[in-house]
Image (tube, rainbow, N blue to C red):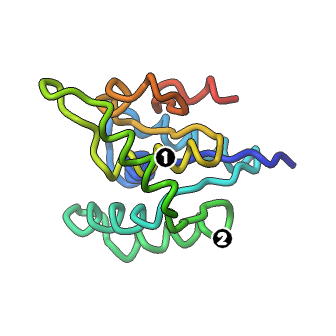
Amino acid sequence: MTNSKIVLDSNIFIKLFFKEEDRLQAIELIKELGKRNYQVLAPNLFLYEVLSVAAYSEFPTWSAYELIRQHQKVNLQLVDIDEKTIRDAIGITEQGHRNSGYPSFYDSAYHALAIGNTCQFVTADKRHEAKTKQVGYITLLKDWEALF
């Protein structure tokens, strides 16, 4: 059993119940994380982001909540972010540029959580990755197989 960790962006989990182009990649990644006994971390805001999207979609919100709970029983851990993580997230938000924009605090909180746990933040958000790749600790969903 491995002791590996990963931070998973809510946008990847949301793909489990949306028919998007890269949905199968998200499913394969999540299955592989389970097979390899990875601990999947996300800030508590993950719950609110996923349920908020479900509430405005055709996917039943209660079903989305149950899906989260099932994953929590296996390998998903929702965590409170501490002051150091918040400070790191604020630093990440300052990585952008006035013309191209700055990373959101929400995405930066996930990213900072990965940095604090010395693991990768996996996201489907190409804009966040483009603005913050110099920070490191980030992998796009399309490149998930390189994690292993």
Given residues 15 and 132, the one toward you in this image is 132
Could you tell me which residue is drawn at 30 percent across and 37 percent down?
A: 94
Q: Where is residue 3 in the image (x, y as percent from the top left)?
A: 80, 49
Q: State the residue lying farthest toward the right.
A: 1
Given residues 67 and 90, the one toward you in this image is 90
Which residue is under mark 1?
112
**Quarter of the rendering containing residue 100:** top left
Up the image or down, 135 lies above or below 114; here it is above
Could you tell me which residue is drawn at 61 percent across and 45 percent down?
A: 6
Left or right of residue 102: residue 95 = right
Which residue is under mark 2?
73
**Quarter of the rendering containing residue 103:** top left
Q: Tag 2, which secondary structure?
A: helix
Q: Which amino acid does label 1 sit on?
A: Ala
Q: Where is residue 118 in the image (x, y as percent from the top left)?
A: 65, 41
Left or right of residue 9: residue 101 = left
Q: Tag 1, which secondary structure?
A: helix
